[in-house]
Image (spheres, rainbow, N blue to C red):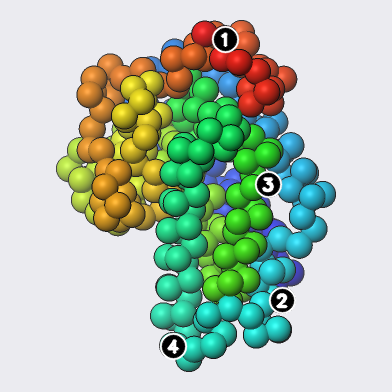
Amino acid sequence: MASEGAIRLGSFLAIFLLVALAEHVWPRRPLTVPKGPRWFCNIAIVIIDTLIARLAFPLMPVGMAEIAKTQGWGILNLVILPRWLEIGVAVLVLDLVIYLQHRAFHRVPLFWRFHRMHHTDLDLDASSGTRFHPIEILVSLLIKLGVIALLGTPVLAVVVFEVALNATSLFNHGNVRIPMVIDRWLRLFLVTPDMHRVHHSVIPRETDSNFSFNVPWWDHLLGTYHDQPRDGHDGMVIGLKEYRNPEKLGLRGLLLVPFRKPYG
């Protein structure tokens, strides 16, 4: 799909701007550190991630889906399903894989060394949804390519999933105040900022909860759902207790997080 890159970039920029505007108009929490340096680091990281991923894996998810279709690879190429059901199943399976991958990145020490960079952010906003170490991005991409080939994921399902994952990552990291009555209704089928914020609590048992990105059902089904932070959204501390010095969380410091001992 030749326009896939433009679709992803356009949707990313549009959602980023919308969430950033909503944060400005309806902020959920006051920021604890200056936004400028954080945004510079987080946006620089997503640019670095994109360049490294393109260089390391010229074959991206849509390309793998096209090959799987041509070669007849994968489960969905062996069964006959209505188009809408095939796409729906593929998107949900990819979402479940991302959930399981996220749990693994918290449980496996080697993976956690890279994923913890994401959790060093001392505030949470739209830019936090782009803050992932390049090595984590490469591992995630490798897993995704394998699942797409094994499942025989349709090209359209890959595009829908990639756009949705980018959009929900920006949205559920957003520092946006949503009235509780709306949040309660919305999180029946979508991970909300209040739900995901619990995952960024400094309290370990809260950090190890709410792993979902798109739909919240996996946390409910697999026992990792945590409704509210112990200290409330206004009182909770975001980040990791081992990384509290913003002066050491510049771009170079972030990229070196997996290779250095925590410094307090």
Ranked by sequence position, the earlier of labels 4 and 3 is 4
Whether residue 19 is visible to the viewer of this picture, yes or no, is: no
Q: Nearer the viewer, residue 222 or 132?
A: 222
Residue marked by disc 1: 263
Instruction: Name the quarter where the N terminus is drawn.
Output: bottom right
Residue in view at x 64 percent, y 35 percent: 133
Residue marked by disc 2: 67
Residue marked by disc 3: 138
Mark 4 surroundings within 10 Å by alpha-carbon count, few (fewer than 14), some (14 through 19), many (20 or more):
few
What's the amino acid at mark 2? Ile
What's the amino acid at mark 4? Pro
Ranked by sequence position, the earlier of labels 3 and 2 is 2
Residue 239 pos. (x, y %): 45, 21
Helix, strand or loop at label 3? It is helix
Label 2, label 1: how far apart the Cα atoms are: 46 Å
What's the amino acid at mark 3? Leu
